[in-house]
Image (cartoon, rainbow, N blue to C red):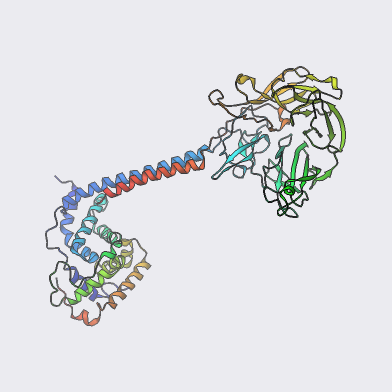
């Protein structure tokens, strides 16, 4: 018989795992690391569950983002932007832009990557992003500016590329 | 700043990239909700252990530092402004006691000793004061202090002033080695103020005698070193030109004085007197302020240097004399055959002072401690009746500890005017833990808890 807290947690994991895994994938760049990151973040939320049970998602995303920065900062040199997406035999047609974005995203510093994902994928405000990462709003702005500049340099965000990329899910 | 709504293309790109996440694959083994919950509970327990280690480390560190700080706190001091007196007990002081730079002035002093003071690096002999008001012990932080003088400091009879030699820069070259003494200072024990009188010197002074002839007069004798750095070693170690200086404290400077004597053995009641010479010697007594000789006293047998005292009239001298040391005190006057042994003064090291025309303050072996313990205390003896009263006793477990040096050493500076006041029950001084001991304990604690914390962190993974 599960306790109410455990039942609530299990239900949350089942419901929100896909969305959280997507964010984790953007933060890490690999399937394996994304699974690992998500599990670590969820485990770390258990001691706080009683307090966050009413609205757990913001806290989980906060732990996810901070864990991605702290854990992977030290491993940055080990990450390689490979031409092929891991776990994929060959790039599919029409996904070249996506590969460039993936490569460019992986090449960003962990904090820059987290800012991009939280601001432009999870749609958090600057203040919410700052709070999630434990940094100032000014730092969010500068990190986002620098990250976008690097993404533009990699030609990931040229208007032609963007217009030719179809949304696929 | 732009948001995903302002950069919809970027959102679309990220969303498309995120679609490659393995959301449709079954979760890896051990990552289901219940398994994650269990792992979370274990993580919480490990966190609690880690917090416990850190808390224990902090508490223990605070306890160690707190214990070290508490060890510096004196126990049960009398309130400031208490009626001054001599303490009834004197303890062997710790070399790690604080100095007056930290404690502030001690106020009127009862006794000044010279004791070993230790710090982070090395040790040195320093004056230590015992407050006549509170009973507090503290090293006296005297600016420009030097321990190289023969008599490095003197305490006024009322305990309000400490005179000492000071170092400085001579007019010529100082000697290559040793402190360069250039003057005399007087330290006010109530305010901590220091007054200095500089004595002209080319290569530095050889400090010979220093004493208070009364509460307002310092008498000192100096020689001048012949050479400084660059001169021969013989010149640097030779001193000539013996000069007496008298500093009336109502004046700013000391003045040369012609006292007509070669050296001084003691001072008090306005006088200074010479040591006796030979087996049957003469003690010359000089009125310091007047600069005139009062009397020549004859001593039946030679006394010990700095152990005798002349009475307020200048007519009689009390001296420990006889064979061995300590000895009985003999009373001598102008007439050689007037010498007699004072009853009750056996085993006296030093006659510190005459309190008045009948009583003398002695540094005498404390017989109450037993025959095997050689520890001096302070007693008052009546030269007419031989009645002896114990004033100050040394404290300690002398039977357990062998080879304990005299606590109240042979030549303590005593504010003897306090001998007529009631003694007070003296608190024992603190026993501070040395700085290296504290640092060592803190270091090993950090190693112990740090190691424990690191081991915990290795195992405490979510």
Can residue B181 be seen at all in this image of the molecule? no
- On the image, the x and y values in percent for residue B311 come to 80, 27
- On the image, the x and y values in percent for residue B363 come to 69, 26
Q: How many marks?
A: 0
- On the image, the x and y values in percent for residue B340 come to 80, 19
Image: B352 above or below B389: below
Residue visible at 30% across and 47% down in the picture: B455
In this orientation, which residue lies closer to the viewer: B365 or A24?
A: B365
In the picture provided, is A137 more to the left or to the right than B94? left
In the picture provided, is B114 more to the left or to the right than B301? left
Quarter of the rendering containing residue B86: top right
In this orientation, which residue lies closer to the viewer: B280 or B243?
A: B280
In the picture provided, is B369 more to the left or to the right than B158? left
- On the image, the x and y values in percent for residue B303 come to 76, 27
Can residue A155 be seen at all in this image of the molecule? yes
Quarter of the rendering containing residue B56: top left
- Image quarter hosting the N terminus of chain B: bottom left
Quarter of the rendering containing residue B386: top right
Residue visible at 16% across and 77% down in the picture: A166
Direction bottom: furthest residue: A160
In this orientation, which residue lies closer to the viewer: A10 or B160?
A: B160
In this orientation, which residue lies closer to the viewer: A24 or B163?
A: B163
Residue visible at 74% across and 31% down in the picture: B305
């Amino acid at each position: 018989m599960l306790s109410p807290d455990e039942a609530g947690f299990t239900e949350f994991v089942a419901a929100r795992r896909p969305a959280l895994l997507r964010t984790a994938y953007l933060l890490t760049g690999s399937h394996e690391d994304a699974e690992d990151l998500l599990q670590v973040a969820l485990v770390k939320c258990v001691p706080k569950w009683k307090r966050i049970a009413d609205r757990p998602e913001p806290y989980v995303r906060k732990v996810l983002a901070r864990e991605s920065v702290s854990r992977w900062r030290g491993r940055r040199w080990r990450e390689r932007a490979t031409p092929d997406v891991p776990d994929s035999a060959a790039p599919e047609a029409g996904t070249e832009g996506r590969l460039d974005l993936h490569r460019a995203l992986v090449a960003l510093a962990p904090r820059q990557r987290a800012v991009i994902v939280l601001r432009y994928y999870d749609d958090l405000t600057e203040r919410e992003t700052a709070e999630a990462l434990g940094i100032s709003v000014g730092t969010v702005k500068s990190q986002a500016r620098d990250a976008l500049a690097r993404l533009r340099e990699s030609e990931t965000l040229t208007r032609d590329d963007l217009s030719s990329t179809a949304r696929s899910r | 700043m732009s948001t995903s709504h302002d950069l919809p293309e970027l959102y679309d790109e990220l969303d498309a990239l995120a679609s490659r996440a393995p959301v449709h694959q079954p979760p890896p083994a051990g990552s289901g909700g219940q398994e994650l919950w269990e792992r979370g509970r274990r993580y919480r327990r490990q966190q609690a252990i880690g917090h416990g280690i850190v808390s224990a480390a902090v508490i223990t560190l605070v306890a160690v530092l707190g214990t070290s700080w508490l060890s510096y706190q004196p126990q049960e001091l009398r309130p400031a402004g208490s009626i001054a007196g001599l303490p009834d007990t004197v303890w062997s002081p710790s070399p790690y006691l604080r100095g007056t730079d930290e404690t502030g002035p001690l106020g009127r002093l009862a006794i000044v000793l010279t004791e070993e003071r230790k710090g982070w690096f090395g040790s040195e002999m320093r004056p230590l004061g015992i407050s006549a008001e509170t009973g507090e012990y503290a090293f006296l932080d005297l600016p420009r202090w030097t321990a190289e003088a023969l008599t490095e400091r003197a305490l006024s009879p009322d305990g309000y002033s400490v005179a000492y030699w000071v170092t400085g820069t001579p007019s010529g070259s100082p000697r290559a080695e040793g402190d360069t003494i250039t003057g005399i200072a007087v330290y006010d024990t109530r305010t901590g103020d220091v007054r200095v009188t500089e004595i002209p010197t080319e290569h530095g002074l050889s400090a010979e005698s220093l004493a208070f002839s009364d509460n307002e007069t310092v008498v000192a004798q100096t020689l001048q070193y012949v050479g400084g750095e660059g001169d021969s070693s013989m010149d640097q170690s030779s001193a000539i030109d013996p000069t007496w200086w008298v500093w009336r404290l109502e004046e700013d400077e000391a003045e040369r004085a012609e006292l007509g004597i070669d050296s001084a053995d003691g001072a008090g009641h306005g006088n200074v007197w010479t040591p006796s010479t030979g087996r049957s010697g003469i003690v010359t007594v000089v009125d310091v302020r007047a600069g005139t000789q009062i009397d020549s006293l004859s001593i039946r047998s030679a006394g010990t240097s700095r152990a005798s005292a002349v009475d307020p009239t200048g007519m009689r001298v009390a001296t420990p004399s006889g064979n061995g040391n300590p000895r009985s005190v003999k009373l001598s006057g102008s007439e050689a055959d007037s010498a007699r042994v004072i009853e009750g003064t056996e085993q006296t090291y030093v006659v510190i002072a005459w309190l008045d025309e009948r009583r003398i303050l002695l540094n005498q072996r404390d017989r109450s401690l037993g025959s095997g313990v050689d520890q001096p205390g302070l007693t008052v003896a009546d030269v007419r009746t031989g009645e002896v009263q114990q004033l100050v006793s040394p404290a300690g477990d002398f039977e357990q500890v062998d080879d304990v040096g005299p606590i109240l050493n042979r030549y303590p500076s005593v504010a003897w005017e306090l001998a007529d006041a009631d003694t007070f029950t003296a608190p024992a001084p603190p026993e501070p833990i040395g700085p290296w001991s504290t640092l060592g304990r803190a270091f090993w604690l950090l190693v112990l808890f740090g190691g424990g914390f690191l081991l915990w962190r290795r195992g405490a993974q979510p």
